[in-house]
Image (spheres, grey):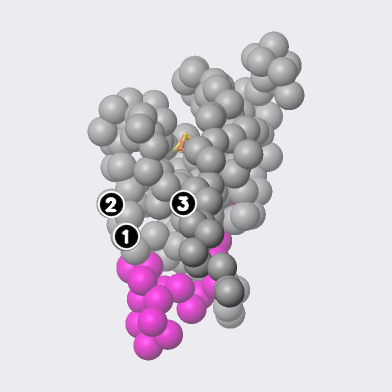
Amino acid sequence: MSYSELQNAVSLEALQVTEAPTLLNAPPNDEVFDDNPCLSCGACCAHFRVSFYSGEIAGPTGGTVPAELVTQVAPLRACMQGTEQGGRCIALRGNVGQDGIQCSIYSQRPSPCRDFPVWYPDGSPNPDCQRLRHAHGLAVLEHRQVRPIPQLPDCDRAA
Ligand code: SF4
Ligand code: SF4
């Protein structure tokens, strides 16, 4: 999608509430960026339905997500409170689009939050992230330079 198409595309109301794979996160993927856009955004944490396998809830299954922040929506599905119909996650702290916004359970957050990328491996920005940023008046992200994968030295090859 071109930049001009993005500009014309979106208002928050027009965005569909979707299930987890296209879910949010601040910051996603445990990836380290020089200038992490999530640290002044949080739009995805205030928009998507954040649902996941209930085994991710802290307890005997070895999950991490605090049970008191979760709604059980089906026998094996849970949802971050506040996001059941799409909306602001209970664990989000701060103001969307402003510096200092953060996830209060970052190290314990569920898988959809971990899996939502800002950029894809080829360096292209995630369009769902872009749409949300645009809807909140935040800058659209540029294509990111992908770092080359280091080559193994020849001495590691079998003789
Ligand atoms: S919408 Fe994109 S930039 Fe904003 S917090 Fe989510 S993943 Fe990060
Ligand atoms: S758990 Fe954290 S990362 Fe996930 S939606 Fe809530 S605030 Fe965002």
Quarter holding residue 39: top left
Judging from the image, what secondary structure is the residue with disc 2 in? loop
Image height of 99 relative to 28, above or below:
above
Is 147 placed left or right of 34 in the picture? right
Residue located at (35% from left, 32% from top):
34
**Mark sitting on residue 68:** none
146 and 14: which is toward the camera:
146
Q: Which residues are magenta?
A: 49-68
Find disc 3 in the rendering and name its residue: 29
Q: Is mark 2 within 8 Å of ligand 2?
A: yes
Which quadrant of the figure contains the C terminus? bottom right
90 and 8: which is toward the camera:
8
Indicate the amino acid at tag 1. Answer: Ser
Q: Main secondary structure of the magenta part?
A: loop
Is the residue under label 1 in contact with that under label 2 (CB below 8 Å)?
Answer: no
- Find the residue positioned furthest to the front: 159
Judging from the image, what secondary structure is the residue with disc 1 in? helix
Residues under labels 2 and 1: Cα distance? 9 Å
Q: Residue 41: x percent and y percent?
A: 40, 31
Residue located at (39% from left, 26% from top):
97
Find disc 2 in the rendering and name its residue: 104
